[in-house]
Image (tube, rainbow, N blue to C red):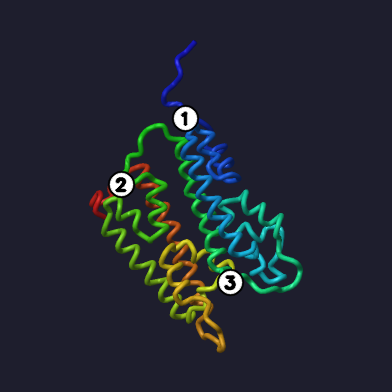
Amino acid sequence: MSASNPNRPPGSPAVALLLGWFLPGAGHVYLGRLRTGLMAFVVVEVLYALGLYFSGGMFLEYLPPEMRGSYAGLLTPEVGNLGALLVQVSHYGYGIGYPRPFPPLMDLGTTLTATSGVLNLLVLSSAHLGARRTQPCLGPGPSPSIAAGASLILPGLGQYLQGRRGRGILIALLLVSLFTVGCCMGDGSNLDRQRHFYYWAGQFMLGLPALVTEFAFGHPRMSFEIAYADAGVVLGCVAGMLNVLVMLDAFHYAEHGPETGEGGGHTT
């Protein structure tokens, strides 16, 4: 009988990914990391449960009737926690068939469910990495998933923690400036999930700058036509989607280390 290979991956990356997508933390449990899996399950599902409680499960009722369909929820941040989203759709759906007032903490509730979905995407990336990599990661600073999560909280923060301070600061300035221009052009109309359901999903990926701005200045009453509202909404969404690339950069650098020819090593 041949000896077991210590470099053999502990499981299938695809299986770990799918398990964790439907049930947060299940991918880690599958890989034998029970404590991490249970912690991920509790945090992700508590966030979603609190979001359901505060929103009354009504976030899909933001959509007008013509945009409601079987797959409408697949373009929301909540899809990262697919199991919880499917339970919500089956239990709450699109409401009771006629308009009704939203709960007082509706915005907080939908933010929590969206946060749960995006957080589980980071958990999934950790499970997938653990299933396919047996050797230590080569990059400096935090682990790949933590580095990506840091850039989700604040654009460029993951790069900054990796020692690429110049790059991190430049990313933060550029993306936050782009988002600010969008808010100014749209007169804050982009800071409302009900008004711009899918564009908000992209903008949400900018992290704290978008969330803090929304809770401070969002949901304005629109009593006049805004000349550049569409441009503002698009720019806000683009800023968030560009931050997804920033997160991928932080994850890749943490896993593989500096690429050959990347000048400046840890400082750029």
The answer for how far apart the CA atoms under marks 1 and 3 are is 48 Å
Front label number (1 vs 2): 2
Q: N-terminal of the two: label 2 or label 3? A: 3
Q: What is the x, y in percent for residue 236? A: 47, 70
Please report the residue visible at 38 percent of the width from the left and 54 percent of the height from the top. 150
Task: Find disc 2 in the rendering and name its residue.
Answer: 141
Q: Nearer the viewer, residue 28 or 253?
A: 28
* Element type at mark 3: loop
CB atoms at circles 2 and 3 under 8 Å apart? Answer: no
Q: Residue furthest bottom?
A: 224
Q: Nearer the viewer, residue 88 or 137?
A: 88
Please report the residue visible at 31 percent of the width from the left and 59 percent of the height from the top. 168
Which label number is shown at residue 9?
Answer: 1
Task: Find disc 3 in the rendering and name its residue.
Answer: 104
CB atoms at circles 1 and 3 under 8 Å apart? Answer: no
* Element type at mark 2: loop
**Vertical comparison of 122 with 113: above or below:** above
Q: What is the x, y in percent for residue 180? A: 41, 74
Front label number (2 vs 3): 3
Q: Is residue 110 left or right of residue 171?
A: right
The answer for how far apart the CA atoms under marks 2 and 3 are is 41 Å
Which label number is shown at residue 66?
Answer: none
The image quarter in which residue 222 lies? bottom right
Q: N-terminal of the two: label 1 or label 3? A: 1
Front label number (1 vs 3): 3
- Label 3 neighbour load within 10 Å: few <14, some 14-19, many 20+: few
- Label 2 neighbour load within 10 Å: few <14, some 14-19, many 20+: some
